Image (tube, coloured by chain):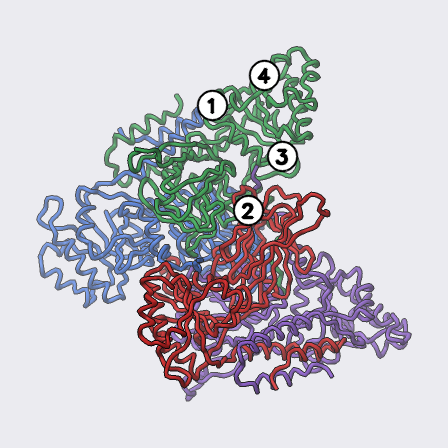
Chain colours: A blue, B green, C red, D purple
């Protein structure tokens, strides 16, 4: 009944030689399918909701409690009670969260209030129908880090002014959630993540020349940064695409950013703003030695490999969404490719991306040059 | 038998509510189809070839003659003669091209040597199985201008050093063409073009308020530029996406560039380099008044409208791939969307885009800052 | 008694060969003199004050009246009446300014209220001991245009928020003026201006080859811009310093900015911010063709000449502080040098330049990139 | 007889109140003196010459020997022998330099060939009438590091292509040196250096709150860099000018560059090119958080202080001409001011600065954007 994409792929594979006109037609069609998909709402019963916040922030803990209580108590989906709520296991004994006080209100809450741990997110992400974040853009990044494989839809509340990623006002949470869990359904933005893997030269005695060992692996939502770390020397980084050497970058470092990350560090380093729907990898050099080396937007179908040359004067350091800080020695490398686990964020509607950029970067509010006469 | 994209679209349309997992699956699938398509070679008999060059450049005319003669004479596709060649009608009486001398060589050439006119390109683009350009990047732009609707595959020769768009060395033309017209087939890059349409306020007496009239329409391969022209005042341009106001740009002007155009004017104005396979519209402001206004990469599914505000202090000027220079008065606007007529360029293979950028921008050759100790 | 700089110059001229240590000593000394001068207050009786404003702006006209009346009436310098005030001759018959009403208040005002015209500013700038501007940065530019030779000290009021050049709040005008005309005196910032002269090829019949004729001359406070105007082609501009060819600039245009102008158009085009005390000419290219062509800060001792090459494909246009728009044909040129008529602006004190930049560009207020976690 | 700058300063000091016209006159005069000084040649007998090179580079050692021999042997200043030559003490026992072989040629060389050590440069810089460097720009930086106080004139040879600082071709060394030590004399460019001093919070028990201790001091020719080092967090640096807080910079770091250093690291970070004759401090932020934070050119009369805020999340690291790497903890700071010990480089003549920039950055050679039609 529904779209059988596997069948389409099979068809493409069979048709060994495409004629020019068929190629044109198919390409246009694929683009159209992609466009339609972006506009599709998901309507599903939300039975289990997870709340992520900064458990050390007292104010946020009180708001989490308020939100949890409302979710537990508000009748939904034909029942006279609300839905299951998972909060951070760190709140289990928090006086401010006061779980006992919450459970006293309705005996049924006993089975409905649950606790999540990083481990649960790793092993059973499908347990959550929706994740709410309460905090700033950093809390959204943290949520991406929690879900290293499949990610449930994420809806992010801002406390004060809206941020780049926090697009729902907390003080209207009832309206927003009633609509999304009701007939409105939710439209999600499948934000690309990168799967980054560290590979190290096998330096054990007797190892084969050129042998490497797989190291850490991370899903990043914003960016992979490889830089010179504490070294005073400029980095020389070899950049390979689909196993061919593309170029050698001489710079303080390189930022490999998703469209989502284009409003973060990459922007400081001179990168362009990229709409999250664009399937692209943004390479922004940090203080490049060659002045004509400009930020590049590469296809997300490229498998990238970034290596510290064997003869490099110094080592390099990499970090993942601002965390990690792993040293890459001579010959070590990192691979990066578009992840099969995108990060679905619930959309508010309208041109929210341009609005968020405009608001956060204060366009038209000023920061402008001197006016003439 | 082959890919039935219409059917896929129909399926997507039927399936009113997508579940989260189906959405993820379909989106991944669409991306995969798109990736496969890019790698598909076209194998087709090339019976009619068109050559575009600068007819005023004597050297190029001699080379065109050499190329035409070889194409006419070299046996191909099981016949003992070559293929039909269309040259610029301006060469019909050129002494340097010396058509009579060419026809003397073989009586069959009489029916095989033909002449193209801009009119023929407009009415019957399907007459040409392949177009060869001889010259620089400018000749490729001119070819795009000739084909305002469907475009045949374009193979571009460079005379001296390769350019951004001219990726085949002319001095190896025999090898290249034998391979492409033989078993190798050709892989093409469907370069996005924009369809730009000028709309003017109906200023005739008795016209309805707000009525507009459709004006010129152009397909552009590089960019649409809207700037202040000779006016000393900064432009205020209203930018609409899918009919919603995205922002007002205060700048000397705006460049709306395709990925292909990202190596042209947009790069001078600070834009990023964008791989031609990426479905994106690059908006690069020229000397923006607001310092945090950065180049933006927008989705090619967006229908853009750029308007001179009714109350603007000055008018604006637009140009299309560097040509045109049309004035937009208060209230007039231009619409821009991804064209249904992409510009297919024959690929040479490998990572030719990064190579072309690297070569033309002299990365690693220098243009670099002072070295330390 | 006072500094005899002519004598110093003579000494330097006599001493044909400087030893290394004397050179070092003298250079350090010159810098010290320069530093001291910047900190020197001027104390002088202000007998005649001129007010510049936008005579079309009703609100400003009322404020001008208020200010004029206060200046006329407030006893100063041992007399029981105020000082002479020159207002724009356009206000002579303005109902809003209501000169008759003003004169009624005190018969002595009859001789004290006077009117300035551009002609008077040109012929007798020494008539004014101080000029007050009421408006925005544009009004200050206009004042610079009024005084094409010697410029009296300029004190600029801002109506709302302070601008780059308008550094005194109007609502505290009494305090400010009492202090400056009293014991405080005024410290002025001698802002460099450029003397720009247009030279045109003598195209009259029988003219000698290479003969040129002097054309318009302007003093500019912000910048000279030379650009391609309505032409679609990039400009090729020959840049000469002290009559030697420095380079040929291929770009949309060039901005030659004073330090004062570094916060205006040049900043939009990517130039640096330059403190007004620095004796420098800032050359900022507009969309340069060569990516490694960066803004350059040149010595103000350089005599620049910018020429449209004789063989240029197109002409160029120049403008002076945003006004003018003069066409330069093939072979024509503009000369630019540091003017002997600087523009003295009254300083408010403190680090007002950094403050003005910080305020206007909204540093730390935001316009910032996404925060991490 | 000669310029008595001390007297001028005294005069300026005496003249408590400057009139407006005297101020204008004096300021113009000071500028003129400064201009004349730049054009002054120094003619002095060069009796003692020092050669700096990389003692580990065999090729350079051979060339040093050749140069030393020529200087020792070529009759000069009325004597039938050359001048004293100081070479690196590391060459004393070098087989490649072969001092014994050199001394065999003329017994007088025994007293003329001498050896320098870093210590000698520190204690007796006046021993050297001229310093020759053989190598690249790095060797010139090293020479600046050797002379932390008074610096003799420096003449820098390039081996291959000329660099930003190495402006004499080695293969014409005889012509260059004969001219400079002869009637031509030498014109020198007094390149500004910065005196940078590290100050640390006194963390000893019983120390007064806010007490600081003076730490390392360096003269830098290119730049002081303060950055986040290995920390993943953005730096917050407090910037004080003449003891007033100018702004807080949120960025990866800050570069404080001399005009000489404007072609080095600062250029990579987006700074402008600054002519070495301009008395300025260039502040270039590295990846600033606030997008409108642009490079600034400050007056060299400003005494700067850059502090890590007491409450900062992380520490900062500073380096001096690319060396040093000193950690600044919370509360520590660095002061920077124009040094009283400039770095005099011998000029070759003409517009060598623009030429060096043009050559090294490959203007007009290319690195340029795609051409239109």
Q: Specify few, some or many for label 1: CA neighbours under 10 Å numbering under 14, 14-19, or 20 or more.
A: some
Q: Nearer the viewer, mark 1 or mark 3?
A: 3
Residue beneath disc 1: A19
Q: Nearer the viewer, mark 3 or mark 4?
A: 3
Chain ID, mark 3: B
Asked if marks 4 and 2 fall on the same chain, the answer is no
Above or below, B92 relative to B139: above
Residue beneath disc 2: C228
Q: Which mark is residue B77?
A: 4
Asked if marks 1 and 3 fall on the same chain, the answer is no
| Separation (CA) of disc 2 from disc 1 | 46 Å
Above or below, C211 relative to C95: above
Marks 1 and 2: in contact by CB < 8 Å?
A: no
Asked if marks 2 and 1 fall on the same chain, the answer is no
User: Would you say C293 lies left or right of D233 here?
Assistant: right
User: Would you say B354 lies left or right of B106 here?
Assistant: left
Residue at the image point whose x is 56% and y is 85% from the top: D15
Q: Nearer the viewer, mark 2 or mark 1?
A: 2
Residue beneath disc 3: B158
Marks 3 and 1: in contact by CB < 8 Å?
A: no
Which quadrant of the view contains residue C336? bottom right
User: Would you say D101 lies left or right of A208 here?
Assistant: right
Q: Specify few, some or many for label 2: CA neighbours under 10 Å numbering under 14, 14-19, or 20 or more.
A: many
Q: Is residue A206 visible?
A: no
Residue at the extreme bottom of the image, as rendered: D206
Marks 2 and 3: in contact by CB < 8 Å?
A: no
- Under tag 4, what secondary structure? loop
């Amino acid at each position: 009944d529904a779209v059988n994409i596997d069948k389409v792929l099979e068809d493409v594979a069979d048709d060994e030689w495409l004629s020019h006109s068929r190629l044109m037609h198919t390409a246009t069609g694929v683009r159209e399918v992609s466009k339609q998909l972006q506009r599709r709402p998901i309507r599903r019963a939300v039975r289990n909701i997870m709340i992520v916040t900064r458990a050390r922030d007292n104010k946020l803990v009180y708001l989490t409690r308020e939100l949890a209580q409302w979710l537990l108590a508000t009748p939904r989906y034909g029942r006279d009670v609300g839905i299951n709520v998972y909060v951070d296991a760190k709140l289990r004994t928090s006086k401010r969260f006061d779980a006992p006080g919450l459970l006293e209100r309705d005996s049924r809450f006993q089975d409905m209030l649950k606790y999540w741990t990083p481990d649960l997110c790793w092993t059973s992400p499908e347990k959550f129908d929706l994740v709410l974040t309460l905090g700033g853009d950093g809390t959204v990044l943290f949520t991406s880090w929690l879900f290293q494989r499949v990610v449930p839809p994420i809806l992010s509340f801002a406390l004060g002014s809206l941020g780049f990623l926090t697009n729902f006002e907390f003080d209207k949470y009832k309206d927003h959630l009633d609509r999304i869990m009701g007939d409105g359904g939710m439209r999600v933005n499948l934000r690309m993540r990168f799967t980054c893997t560290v590979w190290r030269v096998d330096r054990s005695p007797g190892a084969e020349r050129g042998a490497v060992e797989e190291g850490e692996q991370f899903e990043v939502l914003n960016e992979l940064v490889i830089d010179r770390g504490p070294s005073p020397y400029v980095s020389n980084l070899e950049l390979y695409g689909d196993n061919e050497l593309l170029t050698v970058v001489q710079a303080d470092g390189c930022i490999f950013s998703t469209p989502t990350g284009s409003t973060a560090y990459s922007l400081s380093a001179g990168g362009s703003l990229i709409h999250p729907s664009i399937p692209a990898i943004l390479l922004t050099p940090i203080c490049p030695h060659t002045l004509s080396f400009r930020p590049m937007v590469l296809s997300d179908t490229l498998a990238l490999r970034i290596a510290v040359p064997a003869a490099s004067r110094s080592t390099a350091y990499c970090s993942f969404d601002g965390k990690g800080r792993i040293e890459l020695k001579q010959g070590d490398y990192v691979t990066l490719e578009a992840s099969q686990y995108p990060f679905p964020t619930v959309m508010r509607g309208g041109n929210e991306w341009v609005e968020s950029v405009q608001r956060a970067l204060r366009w038209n509010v000023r920061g402008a040059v001197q006016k003439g006469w």
